[in-house]
Amino acid sequence: MISTKAGFRRALLLVLLSPPSTPQTNIPGTTCGELPFFSETPRTATVVAEKATVAWIMDSVAWRKLQKENQAAAEELLRISLK
C-alpha cells in the first residue's frame, strides 16, 4: 500500500472490464494498492512518480507488526483506507 505525502504519482491500472490500461493521477493524501493489500490479492497497478514525491509504503511485515504493537492504530488505518 502506498500513500503520497507530497508530489504526484501516476498509476497504470490493469482493469479487466476496461481498456487494457487506464492512466490515473493521484494527488497528495491519496492511497493506492490498499484493496489488494488488505485483501491479500495480487496487485493490479504499477505506480510511477511523475516528479519528486514523498511516499509512505507499508508492506505485510510492517502491517503485521503494527497490528501486534498498536491494534487501535491498525484498525483505524484499515478503516480509513477502505472508505
Image (spheres, rainbow, N blue to C red):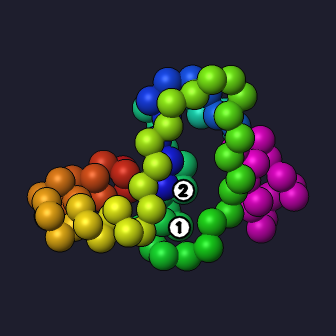
Tell me, yes or no, whether the highlighted magenta stretch contains residue 19: yes
Name the residue type under label 2.
Gly
State if disc 2 and disc 1 touch (CB < 8 Å). Answer: yes
User: Could you tell me which residue is drawn at 69 percent across and 56 percent down?
Assistant: 45
Identify which residue, 25 or 60, lies in the foreground: 60
- SS at mark 2 in the image: loop
In percent of width and height, residue 28 lies at: 49, 27
In percent of width and height, residue 51 lies at: 68, 23
User: Could you tell me which residue is drawn at 14 percent across and 64 percent down?
Assistant: 69
Residue tagged 1 = 36
- SS at mark 1 in the image: helix
The alpha-carbon separation of the residues under discs 1 and 2 comes to 6 Å
Q: 36 above or below 79?
A: below
In percent of width and height, residue 8 lies at: 61, 27
Tell me, yes or no, whether the highlighted magenta stretch contains residue 55: no
Residue tagged 2 = 33
User: Could you tell me which residue is drawn at 24 percent across and 61 percent down?
Assistant: 66
Q: Which mark is residue 28?
A: none
Q: Which residues are magenta?
A: 11-23
Name the residue type under label 1.
Pro
Q: Quadrant of residue 42?
A: bottom right
